[in-house]
Structure formats: C-alpha cells, structure tokens
Image (cartoon, helix red, strand yellow):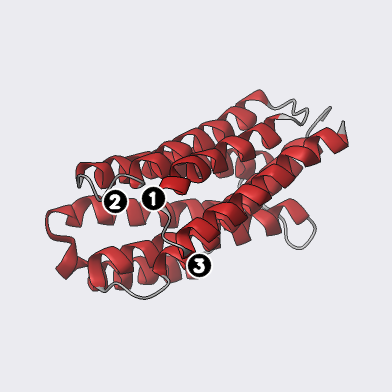
Amino acid sequence: MRSANKRWLYLFLLDVMADLVAVYLNCTTLRYFTKPLLMILLLVWFLSYYLQDSRGRMLVTWALIFSCGGDIFLLFTANNEIFFMAGLVSFLVAHIFYLLFFLRVKKQNRPGKPWNPIVVFLMLIYISVLFYILKPGAGPLKVPVLVYASVLGAMLLAAIHAFHFPAQLSGAFCVTGAMLFVVSDSLLALDKFHQSFKAASLLVMTTYCLAQLLLVTGSRKYLQSRNNS
C-alpha cells in the first residue's frame, strides 16, 4: 500500500519538474498539461491514505480542488484579465479552506491557547507593507488584493498557532508550507502589480509547488496521527 502511495508522490514530483522546465523554456502548450495535473496528483496522493477525520480530509481536499482551479485560470490570463480575477478568487477560497483546517486543528490540538500578539502584529505589518507597495499598481483591484492578502496572512497565523513545537513534525511541515505560500503569492503580486522581474514565474512556481507539498504532507501526517483517537 505504501509503495502505491509513493507512486502518486513520484508522479507529482515528475510533473513539478516538467512544469518548471516548461516555465523556463516558456513552453505554454506543455503547461496546459503539466500545470492542471499538479494539484490533481497531489490530491490523489493525499486521498490514497486512510484518514478517519472526514471533515479534516474534506477541508484539505477542497483546498486542493480550488488550487487546481486557480492554476487553470491563471494559464489564460494573457487572453483576458478576467481569468486573473477568477484565479484570484479560486486561490482565495483555497486559502479559506486551509484556514478552516488549521482552525480545526487548533481546536483539537491546542484548545483555548491564545494567539501570540507579537506574531499577529508582525503579520499585520507584513500585510500593510506589501499592500502599500502593491496599491499604486493594483488599480481597481486594490480591495480584492487587500482581502486576499488578509486571508493569506490569517491562514499562516492559524497554521503557526495550531501545532505544538517542536513535538509535532506535522506542524513544521504545515507552517513552512504556509510561509512558502505567502512567499509565492507575494512574488506573484509584486511581479504583476509592482515591477516584473526576471525568473519571476520560475520562483513563483517553485515556491508554490513546495508550499503545497509541505501543506499536504503536514496535514496528512496530522490526520494520520488522529486515526483511532
């Protein structure tokens, strides 16, 4: 059974490498196949494990489904700007599902534990600075960008406060993944709304794929630890 699980992981990693090569070579046609497959393969790998917590499993599943939708929409942004908005909404919903998952983990794992005000303050500073940089170039998308950045930051905060450190390896995976998701989306926003830079697409996809892999790995490990609990 484990070897069958690993096959899906290996296929995901192969697809990641193929997609990054397609990004580097600017081969859009190949990306119509490699990019949509990323989250599909990761989802199949995640679901190949026995996880008793059906609600937790469902939240991660929907996060990956909407991430896949976002990946597909962003492939067509050159054709019409509405696809960027659709991608933004899809990833916003994906982040909300991850946020709900981490809030659920916190309730199960660290009930009643208060949020660290210093960490919350630092996240607010980061969101404020990022929005200040992006605002001039965001135009009519100022409010959607602010909402997106706020939900993204809340997702990371929830991940940070959901786990015991260093006792839970699942927490290290999830928090690192959430941080990389913030990095990936920040790079994408800076490239689109502030100033485009060389290798932006390659950096965005590298951090994005690693973020999703770590989030799913950590979520799966946590859910497995709750089997029969």
x and y, in percent, of residue 118 in the image: 49, 70
> Label 1's element?
helix
| Residue type at the position of mark 2 | Val
Amino acid type, callout 1:
Val
Occupied quadrant, residue 69: top left
Quadrant of the drawing holding the N terminus: top right
Tell me which label, 1 or 3, sits earlier in the chain: 3
Residue under numbered circle 2 = 147
Of residues 170 and 108, the one drawn nearer to the viewer in this rendering: 170
Q: Amino acid at mark 3?
A: Val
Residue at 61% x, 48% y is 15
Q: Based on the displayed image, in which of its 4 quarters is residue 168 positioned? A: bottom right
> Which numbered marker is on residue 119?
3
For marks 2 and 3, give the CA distance: 19 Å
Q: Quarter holding the C terminus?
A: top right
In the structure shown, which secondary structural element does the residue marked by tag 2 occupy? helix
Question: CA separation, marks 1 and 3?
Answer: 15 Å
Q: Which mark is residue 181?
A: none
> How crowded is the residue under tag 1: few (<14 C-alpha within 10 Å), some, or many (20+)?
some
x, y percentage for residue 91? 40, 44
The numbered dot on residue 151 is 1
